[in-house]
Amino acid sequence: MNRWSAWLAVAVVAYGALWGLTGLVGEDAVRKVVHASIAPDPSGGSDALWPAPEDEAAASSLTVAAVAPFLVRTDAAYHCGPLCGFSRSELFLWLPGLVYELAVIREIVH
C-alpha cells in the first residue's frame, strides 16, 4: 500500500466518521430547532403550524436525516383534513453548537 492509498483510506474513514457524527448528534440538534419553530403557540393562536394535542383529526410528521457530513435535511408535514395542510423541506448546516438554515427546498401550503 503506497502513501497515496493510505491518505485516501484515511480521508474515506474520516468522511464516514464525520457523517456518522452528524447522524448521531446533528440530527437531534436540528430536530429540536425545527420542532421548536413549528410547535403550536401555547396561547392557542390560530396560525400554529403543528397540531394541538386535542386536535384528533390532525396528523403531523417530522423526518430528519444527515445527507452528508454537517448537512441535515428535514421534511415536516402537517395535515388537518381535505385541502388543509403544510409541508416543508429544508437543508441545515450543523456544527457542534450551531444550527443554520441553508435553504428551503420545498414548501407547500394548502
Image (spheres, helix red, strand yellow):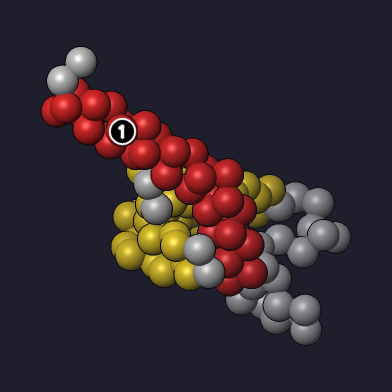
> Left or right: 55 with respect to 15?
right
**Which residue does the image show at 31% across and 33% down from the upper left?**
10
Kindly give the residue lying farthest to the bottom in the view shown. Answer: 43
Question: Vertical placement of 37 versus 4: above or below?
Answer: below
**Which residue does the image show at 39% across and 61% down from the upper left?**
93
* Residue 109 horizontal/vertical position (percent): 45, 60
Using the rendered image of the protein, determine whether residue 51 is visible from the camera's viewpoint. Answer: yes
**Which residue does the image show at 39% across and 67% down from the upper left?**
101
The total number of labels drawn is: 1
> Left or right: 51 with respect to 53?
left
* Residue 46 horizontal/vertical position (percent): 67, 77
Query: Regarding mark 1 in the picture, which secondary structure is present there?
Result: helix
* Residue 104 horizontal/vertical position (percent): 35, 61
Question: Vertical placement of 65 versus 45: above or below?
Answer: above
> Left or right: 51 with respect to 63?
right
Kindly give the residue lying farthest to the top in the view shown. Answer: 1
* Residue 70 horizontal/vertical position (percent): 39, 53
For the residue pair 57 and 91, the one nearer the viewer reads as 91
Using the rendered image of the protein, determine whether residue 63 is visible from the camera's viewpoint. Answer: no
Q: Which residue type does callout 1 highlight? A: Val
For the residue pair 8 and 70, the one nearer the viewer reads as 8
For the residue pair 51 and 16, the one nearer the viewer reads as 16
Mark 1 nearby-residue class (10 Å; few <14, some 14–19, many ≥20) = few
Q: Which residue is mark 1?
A: 10
For the residue pair 15 and 80, the one nearer the viewer reads as 15
> Which quadrant of the rendered structure holds the N terminus?
top left
